Every structure is written in structure tokens, then in C-alpha cells.
Image (tube, rainbow, N blue to C red):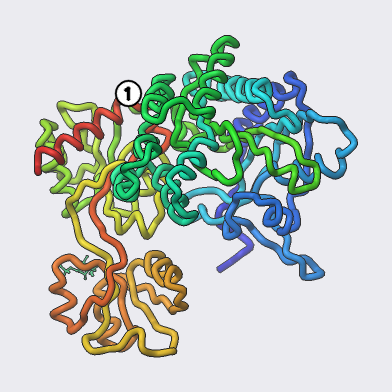
Amino acid sequence: MNYTIHTPEGTRDRMFAECRNRRQIQNALTALFQTRGFAEISTPEVEFYDLFIQSGNPIPQESMLKIIDRSGKIMVMRPDCTTPIARVAATRLKTVPMPLRLYYNETVFRSGAAHTGGSSEIAQCGVELLGAGDREADLEVISLAVEALKKISPDAGHIELGHAGLFKALTDELEIDAGGAEQLRRLIEGKHFAALEDLLRPYEGKRAYQLLTRLPNLFGGTEVLEEAEALVGPRTELSYLRDLYQVLEQAGYGSFVQFDLGLVHQIDYYTGVVFRGYAQGAGAPVLSGGRYDHLLGAFGRPAPAIGFAIDVDAVAARQSAEKREGRLRIALTKGRLQDKTVQLLERVGLDCTPIKNPGRRLVHALPNYPLDAVLAKAPDVITYVEHGVCDLGVVGKDTILEQGSPFYEVLDLGFGACRFALAVKEGSDFYGTYKTRRIATKYPNVARRFFAEKGMDVEIIKIEGSVELAPILDLADAIVDIVETGATLKENGLVPIEDVAPVSARLVVNTAAMKLKKNEILDFIGKCQRGLEENI
Ligand code: PRP
């Protein structure tokens, strides 16, 4: 490899118009922040690793880009700006009275997203209001977030509010352990409606159960607060959101503010109102923020704080909203799942003739429903939905488990059912040896997670197909693979010894599309649900 002509993964050169576009967005935002009395702050791009670990920053350590300095200390390219700003507020600025109004226009660095086209360098513009913990402070920062969105997304955009305290209070009532609460959080965050109900079933008698099962659905206008209150009665968090909405409405921001009570990201970090901002044409939220009242205390200057950051590149990459002309776009996994999906859609009256006779065409417009379907390989379905070039997708849980799920997984479609299993040569004693076991698989992430949860250190070998060959040829001690009928294992003298995870087809939705095209997407999900019920 000739390293002189490439840039590292996740980075790229930016040219002319792209630079101009980025700069325009940054200028518009920083001018706005200045007029609101915020002062610019700039912190080093490289910080000590301990800064982020010891202060309780929620960014996982594997997402941080690390460097070892001359003396052997671990440094990181800063993964966010808030933590360094809290450090400055508690040290260099400790004699400056609060509240402090600070803004930044910086690059943050995170590894991991490069293979899916994501960037390791993220240009962020954001604000922090430190030392103010009342509703006035929340109003100030959220209205500034709306003004910022209006600057960068004049066509359409909105902010959604949630409350970190709500989820915490509900899980406390459930008396669920920390592991269970984290599982619950993940399911709510990913809008895994079906799996959430399964996990919560043992708690059916508790009052919090009703609201927790509905939480992923509760996004939209003030009616979601009413529904939540009807389920669990008055709550301080809900009445706080209502009051906040009222003052935002009085200030003229009502039409830009909605709610998502299922906003449960980084729940241990945030302490009050949390919010996300959506801009038409962006495949992911472009703004993220919330109240974090514990961070400054970690630096010895306890004080409440609230802030938000805007992903400048996500804003710059917005596609023009008109391109889709009000139609939804779905990515379907080619092959077996394709036929089953077509059957499901036909059951509720969608004319799928173009998908059934695709020829060499790759995009198919349904004649009697505003939906365009593209046919793709399973991993690509995930990529298209993640990037928002497709609003929806149908893909197997096997691919989701392997590739991750940066989208909402809204329906278990039931078909394509099989399971991941651990299988060995008949008669072999997999667990009865101390040697490091070798596992062959097409799904290295699934296998790695499975053994990590068992606390077992194994060696994983990636195989592209006919994985059963690996133990037969003595390349591996076992395989982790998909088992449907079990015939392949049997014919090759292998036996399953443990189930790893069940698999079936899922309907997935891009996170931003769910918010920006809510009615159309809910209509389509409803159709799929009806199709599934009619099949029972
Ligand atoms: C899958 C899987 C197994 C087989 C299991 O392979 O990897 O080999 O199906 O099905 P069964 O339990 O009904 O026998 P696939 O057909 O996708 O081919 P590949 O192994 O070449 O990828």
C-alpha cells in the first residue's frame, strides 16, 4: 500500500464548494450564538484519555482515537467538546461567576463508523450554558436550538424533547436490575416494539409497565404527554415537559417543538430534558443535546449545565427534500425474503408486479401505493437505511446482529425464521478442554459477542460460505452459523450444542425518516402489521 497517496480511513480531503458550504453553515451558527451572548472557546484537539474516562463521559472507549505520547501516557483525539469545556470551567475559569455561556466550532474525532461511510472527523458547532439549572435556562438553550435549526434547515425541521428522568423513574418502579434496565433502554432506543413487550411481560402487573411498553411509540405532539399521563398518572417529568412546551409556545417556538418520550440515549449522563433536532433531507438527527447536571461536579465545581451540538457535516450533506416527491423508499433483501415480503404486501392490497418482474431494473415504483422498492443484498439494505437514502428496509436479524442497528427495528415479520447456533463435530467435547477454541463463522461479530458474554476467550476465523467445512477439515473446533432445518449440519456429521440467537426478517426504519415522514411511515407499518395478522 502506498501510504503517500491515501488519507486514513474515515477522513477525506474537502474541496472548494464543500468547504464553502461547511463554512457558511459554521458562520451562520456562530453568528447566531454570538448574538445570544455566547463567547467562543477552543480547547486542544488532543486530551488525556483519563479526562473522558474519569469524568463519566458516555462515549465508549472503543470509539476514541488514541495516541501514546513520548512519556507513554494515553491521549485521545477529543471525542466531544463538552467534557473539555467542563474542565476549563472548573479550572481556568473557576473564578469567573456562573452562568457561563460558551460556544465552540470544532472538530471531534470518533473511530468506528468509517466502514459504513461514516467519518472519524465530525465538525461540530455547539453551545454550553453552565451554572443555570432552571426552566429559564432550558428555555434559552432549546429556543436557541430551534433558531439554529431554522438557520440551517429553512425548509423544515423540528426539535423533539424527552426527559432522562422518566425512564429512570419507571425502571426504578419496575425493580429491574441494572443489566435488565440497560437491555430495556436499548430496546426502547431502537424502537424494537415486539422484543420490548417480551422483555416486559413478567412486569405486567406494575403500573410502569403500561408506559414502558408504549414509550417507543410516544413521539409527536402534546398528545403523547396526555397518553403517557393517562397510562401512569401525573409525573413530575411529564408536567415539566408540558410547562416547558408552554413557555416555548409563548415564545413563538411551538410549531418547531415535538416530543419523543423514547429518547433514552446516554441516559446515565443526562439528568433532565434531552432533545434531538431533525432537518429535512438528513438521514440522522443533526442536533443532539440535553441537561447534564453531574459533569461539572466531576471536576470539582458542581453546577447544573445544558448544551447541544450540531453535526455540521450532516447538515451539509442533506439531500434536497423534493427529490423523493413524497414517496417512501424501501430496500428489500433479494432472494427468499423478497418473495415473502411481496406476499405480505400483496395481502394488504399493494400491487407488487414491478418487484415480481424486475428484469434488470433496480428501482421499482409500486403503481397503487407511494412506495419505491429497491432490491439489494442484506448488508446493503442496512447501509441504505442507515444513510437515509432508503426510509425503510426488510432484512434478516442475522445481518442486523452482525452489522449493528443504527436504525429503528419496528416489526418482527416472522418469516425467514431460523436460528444462530453453535455446532461441533458429533462426539467432540467442546467445553471439556483448556485450549483456546477456534470458531469458524460467517458472522464474526455475533460469535465474538456470544463468547464474550460467556467470558470465554476464543479465536475467530472468518469464513465466507459453507462454514460446515471448517470443523470437518479440522480448521476449527466449532462453528457459529445459521441453522434452518438442521439438514446441512446433519449431513456433515455436525450437531448443534447451543442456541446463540433466534433469527427472522425485520422491518427497519431510518431514524430521521421516522420523525420527518411519521404519518406515511406509520401507515406503512400499520399495513405490514395487518398483513401479518391476516396471515395468522
Ligand atoms: C445457510 C447456513 C447453513 C445452511 C443451513 O447457508 O450457512 O449452511 O444455510 O440451513 P439448514 O439448517 O436448513 O441446512 P446458505 O444456504 O446461505 O449457503 P452458504 O453456507 O454457502 O452461505
Residue 510 in view of the camera: no
Q: Is residue 292 in view from this perspective? A: yes
Q: Secondary structure at mark 1?
A: loop
Report the number of numbered marks: 1
Q: Nearer the viewer, residue 158 or 121?
A: 158
Q: What x and y, as percent, mark residue 311?
A: 58, 37
Q: Quadrant of residue 165?
A: top right
60 to the left or right of 405: right
Q: Nearest the camera: 188 or 285?
A: 188
Measuring from the top left, give residue 250's x and y in whole percent.
57, 9
Residue located farthest toward the front when viewing the structure as drawn: 205
Q: Image quadrant for the C terminus?
A: top left
Which one is nearer the viewer's eye here, 233 or 296?
233
Look at the picture and state if 326 lies above or below 362: above
Instruction: Report the residue at 42% width, 52% height from top.
Output: 183
- Residue 82 % position (x, y): 69, 41
| Residue 340: image location, x then y, percent | 14, 48
Amino acid marked by disc 1:
Glu
- List the residue tagged with mark 1: 325
Mark 1 vs ligand 1: CB below 8 Å: no
Q: Residue at x 74, y 19 (%)?
A: 35
Location of ligand 1 given as a quarter of the image: bottom left
Determine crowd level at label 1: few under 14, some 14-19, many 20+ residues with C-alpha closer than 10 A: few
Look at the picture and state if 74 lies above or below 235: below
Q: Residue furthest right?
A: 95
Residue drawn at the location 25% of the way across and 81% of the way down: 469
Quarter of the figure that contains the N terminus: bottom right
Residue 276 position (above or below residue 14): above
Is 52 on the left-hand or right-hand side of 323? right
> Is residue 156 or residue 322 the one in the foreground?
156
Splitting the image into 4 quarters, where does residue 524 fall? top left
